[in-house]
Image (spheres, grey):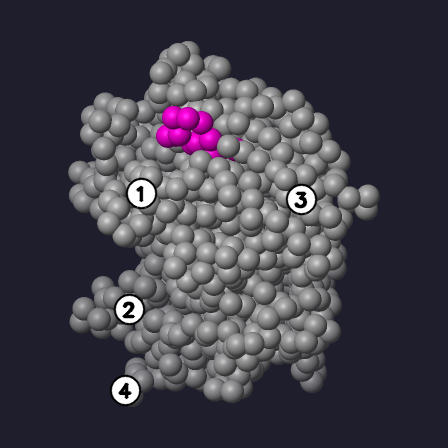
Amino acid sequence: MPFDSFFARAMGDPLRAPYDYQRRLALEPWPEVLIAPTGLGKTAAVVLGWLWQRQNAPQSTPLRLVLCLPMRTLVEQTEAQVRRFLANLGAAEDQGTAERPLPHPDDGVAVLMGGGERDKAPPPWVRCPDRPAILIGTQDMLLSRALMRGYGMSRFRWPVDFALLHSDAQWVFDEVQAMGAGLATSAQLHGLRNALGTIRPARSLWLSATLDPGWLATVDHPAPARVLRVPDDVPEDATSPRVRRLLVEARKRVGPAAARPDGTTRKDVAAYAAALAGEVLESHRPGRTTLIILNTVARAQEVYRILLQRLGPAGADRLLLLHSRFRPAERQAQLARLTGPATPEAGAPDNGAPDHRSAGRIVVATQAIEAGVDVTSAVLFTELAPWSSLVQRFGRVNRYGECADGAEIRWIDLDDPKGELAAPYPPEELADARRRLASLTDAAPANLPPPDRGPPLRHVLRRKDLLDLFDTDPDLTGFDIDVSPFIRDARDTDFQVFWRDFAALEPSRQPLPGREELCAVPIRRAAELLKERSGWRLDPMAKPGRDAVWMPLGNSRPWPGLVVMLDAADGGYRPDIGLAPEITAPPVPVSTVEPPDGPGSHDAESHDTQSHDAESHDDDRDSRQNRPVALTTHLGHVAAAAHALCTALDRRGAIDPAAQAAVVTAARWHDVGKAHPAFQERMVKPAGWDGRPLAKAAAYDRTRGRAYFRHELASALAYLQQRGGDAGAELTAYLIAAHHGKVRLSLRALPTERAPAGVTRFARGVHEGDELPLVDLGNGTRSDPVALTLDLMELGDTPAGEPSWSARAGRLLADHGPFRLAWLESLLRIADWRASADEQAADREGGRDGER
């Protein structure tokens, strides 16, 4: 199938032809930077270009497409587009090959936004690194994972997401002018991948209508040389009548608005909102959309309130408020209204075309609409903003050249002696935009000057920072490295809140939130929201199996990514206007919360208040499954799964023979430590069990055995003491120890771990001299009885002259680099997940003890 036919099929329009630059992205190697005006289909260009290359050149095309977006509204819109493309292309049908070149719409598309993961199992894109996937997420979720500090997920899975995002992945950073600090981080990560090496290439593409490639020059990443400028570098598009209609002939008259604020007091804002509402109603064109873009949520809410009063109940359907401080359900409802047809008057046809018998609509919005949202208007009112933001806003006017008589833009000056009205933007950026607007009379894209200043570099990720982040253990005080300065500017960082009915269930026992409940709150508004409200956060020391997982926030200041629970009776949110700290009544409507699905979701071990977020160092939830599995059987299953996974990845050149041997050997040994009496005491044996050590049991009694016991540490020690002289033994031992993400670079007792009487060394529940019995490894080999020693947890070499654990891990990190080492670490974990799932599936199909 030629690309033009492929494109038309994906778009669902047999007459739709691609622009030539879209054709180039499918048929030629990608640039590093794509600069194209708004309205020319950049999302379709990159998604369909990647899908075409996956179908026609799968070996050379990255398996994962990572769409990194600055705003939640873009994520939801992009997800809908991607799913529509895949459905139109028949990606859910048999693709005719054993290895799918295209992602399946059901499990090959993943959305990463604030809210965490309530499902016990890792998502399909994580469990299946050998299958194609499209990941769509905000820069907060994606860059935090790329820095191994993933927001809203288990800390113990950080290395896996880190590994998959840095290997065999095509990153696309869209609307980069809105990325802030994340822009430099994206460039540095690309440069560091090139410098430190990856198993498979991870590429980057930065795109925007307003982008200077020089912005991407950082200490480890030179300014990109491969730049595609549309239409300048694409002669066919430059001379295309279709492109000229959008870039030249779509007239947009520009002039100042009469309304402007005189100050920042509540009285000043009310007077300004009233004046602006009046000017908007006078200039609105029947049958068209009028768009008002304001720089703060508070001003947008006030203008919306006054317009609602003046239009009355009969005009409420014509009015729409959109900003980033809504919960997902309300935000999606507003977006659906925004991207649908204008509201017609009675009797007018509702076919989506402008109709002067219809009333049209008035949309009040903030920056949430300025990038990527597919909407057009005949009249735009916009507050003064940085030039790159204004260019994006202008792209929401006469976007498709539909206004034959031209559209109108009125800009609202924000100028006060103290610069308070400029917030959240620097006053100097508004002054630059004011200077440009002074001589601009028409904002057709061809008339807009390029940006002449880039975003300031405030925090630049360095190599040492990345290597420090590879260690996922918190420091001795329990704190982690804060990666938020590398992700967003301080003024843009958010935490999340949700509301619950405390009268129905006490706060400490409330279930964890779903993504649909969460509302983003800027850090700068934390004091206002929490002044008269008591917040609750997850208790990091909560013990698995207990109901209470929430603790009072107290006087602590929220930090980026934190999830805070509030009492619905205290207000602070209204479905029609979103986050509103000043509103204390009526109570916030509470979403219905369902417990997560999965084995044991209602029992003590996997209570519905538990999830990855509450997982502790003492948790071994993966060992509790529906049916028992013997240890020897499980070791064989995981070794087979590891071999199969490595074989599949070897076909893509994603693993070398030595590394494959280490992964498969580690799989054979990974759970040997479960034979320890401290672990077996916790496994509740089924009636008639023959006494073999168990790897999985239907019941797991945490009250028995030894506190903090980590079986993977015992496994690694047993392996080193018996096979430490083998080639690749250090890597194999590391993979064994790290296969739950809880024992990695450092080996030390937890702060709350008590010293046992008469024991010289102890860590993670393993004591010096512990006896581990013989274990049949299932392939004709065995682990002999051994007395475990922890001498390698000491500083310096052991008495036998062997390096310490930290020295071994440091050497592995230096030899393999963080991206390769995390990749190998992840393969064993994924093989373990797959084998465990298959064991339970086999049991449901009638197998014995999960054996196949």
Query: In whole angstroms, how far apart are the C-alphas of marks 4 and 3?
Result: 81 Å
Q: Is residue 418 left or right of residue 380?
A: right
Query: Is there a contact, CB below 8 Å, between mark 2 and mark 3?
Result: no
Q: Residues within 10 Å of mark 1 (few under 14, many from 20)?
A: some
The residue that appears at 66% across and 54% down in the rendered structure is 271
Q: As shown in the figure, which amino acid type bears the numbered disc 3?
A: Arg
What type of secondary structure mainly makes up the magenta span?
A: loop
Ranked by sequence position, the earlier of labels 1 and 2 is 1
Numbered label attached to residue 688: 4
Specify few, some or many for label 3: CA neighbours under 10 Å numbering under 14, 14-19, or 20 or more. many
Residue at mark 2: 840
Per the model, the C-alpha gap separating discs 2 and 4 is 20 Å
Specify whether 596 is left or right of 465. left
> Which is in the foreground here, disc 2 or disc 3?
3
Residue drawn at point x = 26 percent, y = 27 percent? 16
Disc with the residue nearer the chain's start (2 vs 4): 4
Q: Mark 4 and mark 2 in contact (Cβ < 8 Å)?
A: no
The magenta segment:
394-407
Q: Amino acid at mark 1?
A: Arg
Q: Nearer the viewer, residue 179 or 716?
A: 179
| Residue 687 shown left or right of residue 149 in the figure | left
Image quarter where the C terminus lies is bottom left
Q: Amino acid at mark 4?
A: Gly
Kindly identify which residue carries mark 3: 260
Instruction: Tell me whether the residue at label 1 lies in contact with that at label 3, contact meaning CB atoms closer than 8 angstroms.
Output: no
User: Which is in the foreground here, disc 2 or disc 4?
Assistant: 2
